[in-house]
Amino acid sequence: MYGYIARQPIFNVARETIGYELLFRDGEANAFPLIDADEATSKLIMQHHLMLGVEKVAANKLAFINFSEETLLHHFPTSIKPESMVIEVLETVPPSAELLHTVQFLSEQGYKLALDDHDFDPKWDPYLPYITYLKVDIQQFNLLQISRHLRRVAHFPFTLLAERVETAEQFEKLKLLGFQLFQGYFFARPEMLKQKQLNSNKANLLALMAEASAKTLDFEQLADICQRDLGLSYKLLRFINHSGHSQAISSVKHAMVYMGEAELKKFLALLALANLQDGAPDELLRQSLVRARFCDALANHSKLAANPPSSFLTGLFSNVHLIVEQAQDELLAQLPLVSAVKAALLTREGQFGHFLKLTEALEQANWPLTDDLLKTLPAGAELAPLYLDAVAWAESILKQV
C-alpha cells in the first residue's frame, strides 16, 4: 500500500522556492479525496510526517500544512517541529475564543501561522498579531478591492502570499501591491509524490520503538501507545507472566514499571519489530532477534552494558529498514537512537558497529574476518555458545510474539 501527497511550491519575488504547500491525496489522480478536512490532515501527518518527515517531503524548505478546526484545537501541529512548517488555518474554521487561545499558544511556541484564503472580514483582526503569512486568493477579488483591504490591515506585521496566480501580468501587479510570496499555476502545478505507507497500527509500533530507544523512558507515553492496541497490551502482560513474575498487575503502566527499565526497553523494541514484520520475510525478524541477543551478549562480555541497552538495539534495528521498506538513513532519522547506535547501523563504526560486523561475519561463515574481529574482544570470548544461545532465544521469542 502506498501513501500519496501533492506539493505545490511557493515562490518569492525572485521566483525562488521558499516552501511547499502539502496537499493530501489518496491516489495517483492528484485530486483531493471526498473526505473531511480533519481526516485529510490526520492522514497527511500520520502517513508522511511520522514515516518520512515533512522536512524530507518539503526538501528542507517550509512546509505549509492545512489544519481544520478539530486538529487545531487538539494541538495536532505540535507533533511537528516549529522550524519545519507553517500552520495554515483553513478558511472554513470558525473564529472563536478557543481558536484564538490556540493560535496565541502556537505562536508562543514558535510556530508560524497563516490564514488561508483570507477574506478580510474584521472578525479575523484579533488573530492578525499572531499571523506570519496572510494568504489571499486573488481570484476572489479584483486588484482594486485587494488594495483597499490591504490598506486597512497594513499596520499588522504579516507577509502577504498571493494564491492562484495564473499570469505574468498578475504577478507583476501583485508585486506592486506589496505581495512578497506567490503560488499558482503560473509558477507550477502541484507535484505528486508517492511513498510506501504504513497503516496506523504500524505507525503506533514505530512510535513504540522510538520511545523504547530513548535514554529515559516516559511511562505515561508508552502506556498510552500500548493502550491504543489491545494486542500490544495483552502481549506485554503475557510476556511478564511468561517471565515468571507473580505479582498481580493493575494497569499497563504498572506492568511496565514492574518489569524494570532495561528489560522493558528490550521487550518493547522487539515486540514492536515483531508486529511491524507483518508481510515481510520471517527470516528478517529471526535474524534481527539473533543479532540483538548476540550483540547484547558481546557487550556484556566486554562490560559495555548501557542504558538504553545500545548493543541489543543495534542488532535488533539492523533490519528494520528492510522490514518496512524504507531507506535506512531516513528511517533512523525518525528514531531517537543514541549516535553510537546510528553510527553502528549506518557505517558499522564504533564498538557496537564492531559487534554487528562480527555477527554478520558469523552469519556469512566468513571465518578469516571472524578471527580478525575476535582479536579485539577480551580474552576468553567463546562465540559458538553465545551464538547458539542467541539462536535459541530468538526462537523462544518468536513463539511469544
Image (tube, rainbow, N blue to C red):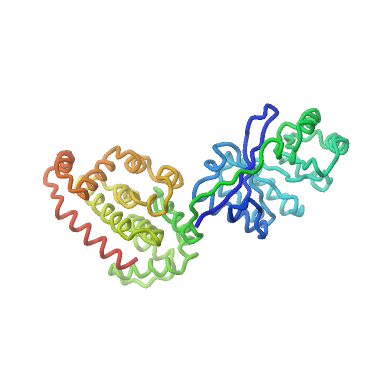
x and y, in percent, of residue 63 in the image: 61, 42
Q: Is residue 172 above or below residue 239?
A: above
143 horizontally vs 200: left or right:
right
Q: Quadrant of the C terminus?
A: bottom left
253, above or below 126, in the image: below
**Residue in view at x 14 percent, y 41 percent:** 368
Quadrant of the rendered image containing residue 177: top right
- Give x and y (percent) for residue 371: 14, 42
Q: Name the one closer to the observer, 259 or 344.
A: 344
Say left or right for 400 vs 358.
Answer: right
Q: Measuring 75% from the left and 38% from the top, which residue is drawn there? A: 166
For residue 361, above or below residue 212: above
> Which x, y percent locates residue 235?
38, 68
Q: Quadrant of residue 154?
A: top right
Residue 31: x %, y % from top left? 65, 52
Q: Nearer the viewer, residue 382 or 146?
A: 146
Of all residues shown, which one is farthest toward the left? Answer: 380
For image coordinates 29% across by 48% down, the residue present is 311
- Most extreme residue toward the front is 29
Number of numbered discs visible in the structure rendering? 0
